[in-house]
Image (cartoon, rainbow, N blue to C red):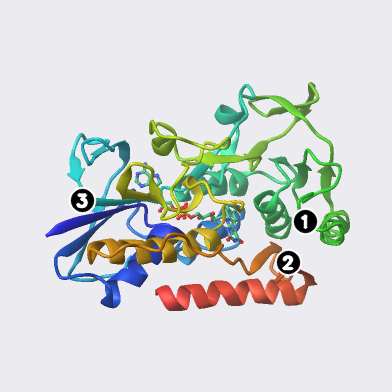
Amino acid sequence: MKKLVVLGGGYGGMRILNRLLPNQLPEDIEIVLVDRVPYHSLKTEFYALAAGTISDHHVRVTFPEHHKLSVKYGEVTKIDIENNTIHFEDYSTLSFDDLVIGLGCEDKYHNIPGAQEHTFSIQSINNSRKAYQALNDLAANKVVAIVGGGLSGVEIASELRESRPDLTIKLFDRGNIILSSFPERLSQYVQNWFETHGVEVVNSSNITRVEENTLYNHDEPIHCDTIVWTAGIQPNKIVRDLEVEKDNQGRVVLTKQHNIPGYDHIYVVGDCASLPHAPSAQLAEGQAEQIVQVLVKRWNNETPPESFPQIKLKGVLGSLGKKHGFGLVNDRPLTGRVARLLKSGILWMYKYHKG
Ligand SMILES: Cc1cc2nc3c(=O)[nH]c(=O)nc-3n(C[C@H](O)[C@H](O)[C@H](O)COP(=O)(O)OP(=O)(O)OC[C@H]3O[C@@H](n4cnc5c(N)ncnc54)[C@H](O)[C@@H]3O)c2cc1C
């Protein structure tokens, strides 16, 4: 038996399993899925978990069951690509014949002193639970700062607004308008929503330091009771530690078949892979589809496609609490209840097909 190890049961890893397991796995291949948590975590919903508007159970999906799939739970500490071995925190090891690395991303703190130590994160389920505890334990009328006005910053600020109307919420954003990578009409819609709902958006901010309960914006101290960091991401530390070529965001440069150059049996999927789009769950799934094609061809001793068409993304949808949303669907801006309904519908479908 040859062993395919899938590191990370996130959006990319799950799509690989869901495509291979039903009927594409050759007789002589078995799969080992590795994750630190015993379920697929719906990272796109972590903002609501942290805000306290959905339960923990709502963001978990069980891993598939199959006689050719075994699951190893553990914290990966190192990938030895020269010796085809995965190392774990408990000093155990796991060998592989083929490997797909899908370990996702972590916060990036841009070397801002105190940012990592004094802020909460929503980049992993464990950290989102800690953020939930801190935010929901706050006494009445306390001040929450959210640093970073991208999609996840906007979603947690609005969800928290609905969850805790008593809190003062300040959203610090570097741009002179929120969601600056979106069309202006959408940014304006979101900015207006925040104004109407009493979330203070601090534009053109520059966080220079963080201390316990204090955020420094352009070196000006601002008292905050809880600070949440959503101001940047970078690939998982395990991947950052790999001695292979990376792009300027630290993501692994890959061949057109999505393997590490010189290592035809080691693929990288999702947030850790250098792709011509911003990282997203949709992109991880699209790339996983292509990796499956390459794996199957190579297992059958056939030549994989020389290149693939660009991965098609359908768009982005963000929520503003439970009733409003915004987004771009097939390049068309969408706002209001329809956008929110669409987002909920997509999540429902995703869980329905995985559950
Ligand atoms: C609040 C928020 C909202 C988002 N909204 C959207 C959205 O609306 N649409 C969209 O397309 N994208 C969205 N994203 C981005 C999306 O979640 C990621 O791009 C996507 O999860 C990447 O998939 P992945 O397979 O690369 O990794 P992940 O889904 O992050 O999976 C990584 C897996 O690896 C495991 N893991 C990590 N490190 C270790 C280790 N050392 N040992 C063992 N296991 C480990 C984790 O437990 C996890 O299961 C959002 C992200 C956030 C934070």
Q: Residue at x 27, y 65 (%)?
A: 302
Disc 2: CA contacts within 10 A as few (<14), some (14-19) or many (>=20): some
Residue 307: percent from the left, percent from the top?
A: 47, 60
- Vertical placement of 1 versus 95: above or below? below
150 or 241, which lies in front? 241
Residue 239: percent from the left, percent from the top?
A: 41, 38
Look at label 2 and name its amino acid: Leu
- Vertical placement of 261 versus 43: above or below? above
Look at label 3 and name its amino acid: Asp
Location of mark 2 (residue): 328
Badge 3 element: loop
351 or 133, which lies in front? 351
- Badge 2 vs badge 1, beta-carbon distance below 8 Å: yes
Whether residue 41 is visible to the viewer of this picture, yes or no, is no
Disc 3: CA contacts within 10 A as few (<14), some (14-19) or many (>=20): some
- Badge 3 vs badge 2, beta-carbon distance below 8 Å: no
C-alpha span from label 2 to label 1: 8 Å
N-term-proximal mark, 3 vs 1: 3
Location of mark 1 (residue): 182
Q: Residue at x 19, y 56 (%)?
A: 3
Residue 330: percent from the left, percent from the top?
A: 70, 71
Location of mark 3 (residue): 97
Left or right: 266, with 53 as reference point: left
